[in-house]
Structure formats: structure tokens, C-alpha cells
Amino acid sequence: MHAVGIVLLLVVLATAVSTFAGRLRVPAPSLLVLVGLGVALIPGVPALHVPPQAIALVVLPPLLYSSAEELSLRDLRVVWRPVTILAFGLVFASAAAVGFVAVAVTGLPPAMAFVLGAVLSSTDPVAVTALGRRLALPGRVQVLVQAESLFNDATSLVLFKVAVGVAVVAGGAVDLPAAGWELLLLGGGGSVIGAAVAGLVTLVRRRTTDPVLETVIALVTPYAAYVLAESAHTSGVTSVVVTGVLLGRSSHRLTDAHIRLQLHAVYAVVVFLLESVVFSIVGLELPELVRGLPKGSGQWPLQALALAVVLIAVRVLWTLPLTRTVKPSRGRLSWRVAGVVTWAGTRGVMPLAAALSIPLTGTGGTALAGRPLILVLTTAVVVFTLVVQGLTLAAVVGRSGLALEPEHTAREEADARDSLNRSGLDHVEHLATLEAVPEMVVDRVRRNLSARLDRSPDGPDGGNAEATYRQLRREVIAVQNAELHRLYDEHLVSDTTRRRLQHDLDREEAALGSP
């Protein structure tokens, strides 16, 4: 009951915080971390202990799945080279840099310093997606940041396992061939299982028309992908990401408008609740972890700041050469793009879950030196990135000049709507020449598409005309859906515009009622 009460309190608190965050135009995750930190400092508030298994199994799968579904596979094909370089090279570089600096400024043993570097080496997809929703970044820049955070898990997880193995086993050595094989097993195995789950879910959803069953399948899918991959000793996170990317690309072909709208509403609630709880937990846990530090660790705030600065510096230097391949750099090195990609690469709950899973003792039964400090430094860096980078990310994007102007987005959407309406009108005119539909119905749909203002009643034969009208409108919407995906496949509209227009078409089709 104690845990349930805390969760309910966090949900209520998060709802109020998110409301104020929207009014203040600040990212809700950043404000949730600050509020959680403030609540934890209130005298008498009970300490919060969250098992890392609970975060990994209950919270992460649906959040990762939702983030992966939002990823544009079309744009990912364009930026896969820099994403691969970041997901591998930058993770190793960040881990090494943090490890060396941690030895110098914190006094941690080298093995434990490398554990800390592995924990902090990758960005967090949950935090990156939550902060990035408010920004109007160019499509390739947004996909670069989001895809990197989704796909660098396997690399950092292998580094973490190797580092923990060295720290736990006294005098342990790094077996590079074994580490390479484990990386292939985690990433490759997780990808195979994720693709298999996506294929199976596709077969099931094509044969399901019940909205309740569709919703249950959508909610169970990320957990199934995660559990199956972890049971096979591969990367559950990679499996969920691959499943989400593949299903997100084909979702418009698997379900109808009614089900898509319902799934969108259900997942919006689930994501809001889980993100609210998880970001509040980050703030709530820091004071309790600080109280558990041994004496003589009073310099941890400066140490955490030094580590955060190192992560930012390494990220800038690593991403700068890659900006040549990302629009709108036009083939030149772009400090603006590098700065935005760096500042958007926040840490979040996944590093915290990894740090909490560090064993308490080594093989000899002795406590691992530095584990409490690693937990505090990890949480402090996470809080720093979520608060400092989160609250200033919009300003950085604005100063960089990369943000898409509202007029640009509105013009792109208006042009796309015009194209959809023209394709619908062409279909109606084709039917009119065939005289396959009553002229009254054709005229009504024609006027609806031309002005979108027609609400006049039907003629004497209103019942039949209404049914024919609805059927013709469904045909027109199907044509418009095809036109929308043509525009998207030919890179004439962004993924954001495609999703917005798809949602509008779904609402319009749902308003027509069941066929």
C-alpha cells in the first residue's frame, strides 16, 4: 500500500506540474525533476527505493515503443551512417573520457570509474523524445538525435557488463573477442527478435477488427518484445525499438481510422503517466542517495558538474564532423547543428536504472568501493542534463536558427492539404463522368472538398443519399490517404506534417461512422 500510495501521489503531482509546465512553456520532464527533488527535501517525506528491475520491465518498454513508433524510417535511411557512428564511436569515446576524468577528480578505482563511464556513455531515448516533442527541428536533425538515443543501448550495455565484470572480479581483464561477441548477440539478437515480434503482430492485427483486442495487442506488444529478448539473453531495449520502428511504419495499413484514434488516445495516457512517474523518481532519489554517501564525499556536486562538462565537450567534438551529412549544413561543418545535437542529447532514467543494478559486493564478498558515489554522480548528471539542458534547449535551438518557423510548417501543411483535396476532387470528377454515383451526392462531396463548409440537408431521398454520400466520402479519404503517403515517400512533406494530416483524416473518417 505504501508503494501504491506514492505512485498515486506522483500521478496527481505530475498532472498538476504538467499543467503549469504547459502554461509556462517549459518542458514537463525538467519541471517534474525539480518538483521531485523539492518534495524529497521536505522533512518527514519517506525515502523512495525503486528496484531497477521495476523500471526496466514496467516503465521502459511502452515508453521506448512509443518513441520508436514516432521515428521516421524514411529519414532514418538517410542518416543511418552518422547514427551508427554515434551509437558506437561516441559511446566508447564518452565512456573512456568519463572514466579518465572520474579517476582524476573523484578518486574512484579505475575499474569503477570505467563502470561510471559506461553508465553515462549513452543518451536516454525516453528523455530525448520527451524533450524533443516541443521543438520544430528539421526532420533529419530530429531523427539523428532520436535514433541515436534509441540504438546506442546495446553498445553501452555491453560496455557496462564488461566494466562491472572487471570491477567485481578482482584483477579481471577485458576479453575483447568476448565483448565483441556479446555486442553482436545483444544488438543483433535483439534486432532479430524485434523483427520477428513485429512480423507476428502484423499478421495478428491484419486479422483483428475489434478495437478492444487491438488496444490490448498494442499494449502487450512492447512487453512481449522486451521479455522475449531478455529471456534469450539479448537486448530487450533493442528488440522493443526495432518492433516499434517497423510497426510504426506500417500502422496505417494495419488498422482503420477508429482504431488508430483509440490507440493514439490510450498510448497518450500511458506515456503521460509513465513519464510523469519516472521523471519524478529521478528527482526523489537524489537526496536519499546523497545521505548514503560515506564521509569525505562532499565534493560530489563539483565532480558531477565536471563529468557533465566532459560529456558535452566530447559530444560536440564527435558530432561536428558528422554535420556534413545532415541538412541544413549543406555539406559544411556546422557548429550550430553540432551544438543542437549535443544539447539535445540528455541523460535520463536508463543510466539511473543501470547504476542501481551495480552489484553490492565483489566475488570476495567485500563491498564494491565507490558504488554509492557512482549512484550519486549518475543521478546528479541526469538531473543536470534534464534541468539545465532541458530548460534551455528551446533557447539553444532558437539561437541556432535551425528551428522551423511556424509559417514554414503552416505553409507545408496547407500545401499538403491542397494536394489531398485536389486528389479527392479528381476522384469525384472521375466518378461523375462514369455516372456511377447520383449527381446530388457527387455535388455535395465536390462542394465539401472545395469549401469544407457544406452542412446543408439532403434532398427527398435523404436516407439513401446519406448512405451513398458517406460511402463516397470514405472512398475519397482512401484516395487522400494514398496521396498523403505518396507525398511523404517522395520527401514532399515532413514526418510531423504526415502524422498531423493522417490524424485529421482519421478523425474525419471516424466521424462518418461505421461502414
Image (cartoon, grey):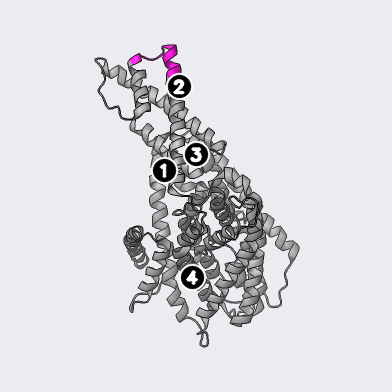
Horizontally, residue 287 falls left or right of residue 15, namely right
Q: Which label lies toward us, 2 or 4?
A: 2
| Pointer 4 with pointer 3, Cβ within 8 A | no
Please name the residue shown 53% across and 75% down the image. 305
Q: Earlier in the sequence, mark 4 or mark 3?
A: 3
Disc 1 crowd, CA 10 A, few/some/many (<14, 14-19, 20+) = many
Q: Secondary structure at mark 4?
A: helix
Which residue in the structure is indicated by mark 4? 384
Please name the residue shown 25% across and 23% down the image. 457
Disc 4 crowd, CA 10 A, few/some/many (<14, 14-19, 20+) = many
Tell me the quarter of the picture where residue 183 sits. bottom right
Q: Earlier in the sequence, mark 1 or mark 4?
A: 1
Q: Mark 2 is on which residue type?
A: His
Quarter in which the C terminus is drawn: top left
Which residue in the structure is indicated by mark 3? 251
Disc 3 crowd, CA 10 A, few/some/many (<14, 14-19, 20+) = some
Label disc, if present, on residue 427 of the rendered structure? 2
Residue placed most toward the observer, 301 or 196? 301
Is residue 323 part of the magenta span, yes or no?
A: no
Q: Which residues are magenta?
A: 429-439
Which residue in the structure is indicated by mark 1? 263
Q: Secondary structure at mark 1?
A: helix
Q: Mark 4 is on which residue type?
A: Phe
Disc 2 crowd, CA 10 A, few/some/many (<14, 14-19, 20+) = some
Instruction: Give x and y (percent) for residue 413.
Output: 44, 40
Residue 220 against residue 181 in the figure, above or below: above
Q: Which label lies toward us, 4 or 3?
A: 4
**Distance from the alpha carbon under mark 1 to that under mark 3:** 11 Å
| Pointer 1 with pointer 2, Cβ within 8 A | no
